[in-house]
Amino acid sequence: MPSINYGTETTPLAAVGASARNILTKENTDKAMAFAKDELGKLGESAKRGDLSIRALALMGGIAMCVTSILGLLGRFVTLHWIRAVMDVYLIILGLLVCFLEGKRFAKLPPAINEGIRKYCYFLDFIWGRGCLYFFIGSLQMSQASIVDLAVGGYMCVVGVTYIVMG
């Protein structure tokens, strides 16, 4: 019976093993690690910033909230509805917050305010956190019960849900 030498025969599995040894070198794994860290950093920044188009929609909603709340505040003073006037002041402040959060390119907050928001409202750094805030603000706006407030509040609720889904 002849002897068979399997050591010199190349099989497809042996070729795969040789290719893997050539690919999985220290240099290649270091490059892959650096690439993965870079892409993960970009993904994290994207998760914090959000898409420009949805940010523009939120900015328009914040401006609309400010305008309708200022007009509502003037009307509440004339009709002496003080409780609703206080709610309008809150909505103006929250509308300005939306404008500052989404309009960072156009208006810069003073560093002390920006650091305070980052320290005490860290959830606003993330898309889902801003979405929860926008949904809450929209529901407050809708509680004012005029047709314009219902429309602007509903719009902000839709923007908030969109942010939550995207985040």
Image: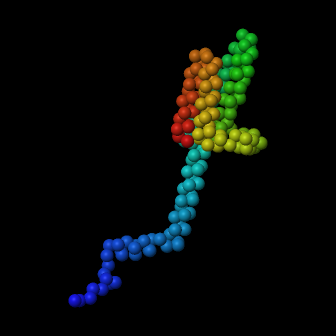
The spot of residue 40 in percent (x, y) is 56, 55
Q: Residue at x 53, y 40 (%)?
A: 166
Q: Residue furthest left?
A: 1
* Along the line of sight, the residue nearer the viewer: 119 or 95: 119
Q: Please tell me whether residue 25 is drawn above or below residue 78 in the rendered image.
A: below
Q: Please tell me whether residue 97 is drawn above or below residue 44 in the rendered image.
A: above
Snapshot quadrant of residue 131 = top right
* Along the line of sight, the residue nearer the viewer: 14 or 69: 14
Q: Residue at x 22, y 89 (%)?
A: 1
Snapshot quadrant of residue 102 = top right
The spot of residue 120 in percent (x, y) is 73, 41
The spot of residue 50 in percent (x, y) is 57, 42
Q: Please tell me whether residue 136 is drawn above or below residue 125 in the rendered image.
A: above
Q: Residue furthest top?
A: 79
The reply to whether residue 120 is in sight is: yes
* Along the line of sight, the residue nearer the viewer: 145 or 65: 145
**Count of picture labels:** 0
Q: How is the image coloured?
A: rainbow
For the C terminus, which image quadrant?
top right
Q: Residue furthest right?
A: 112
Q: Residue at x 56, y 27 (%)?
A: 155
The reply to whether residue 61 is in sight is: no
The spot of residue 34 in percent (x, y) is 56, 63
Report the side of 139 relative to 111 (left or right).
left
Snapshot quadrant of residue 136 = top right
Q: Residue at x 73, y 44 (%)?
A: 119
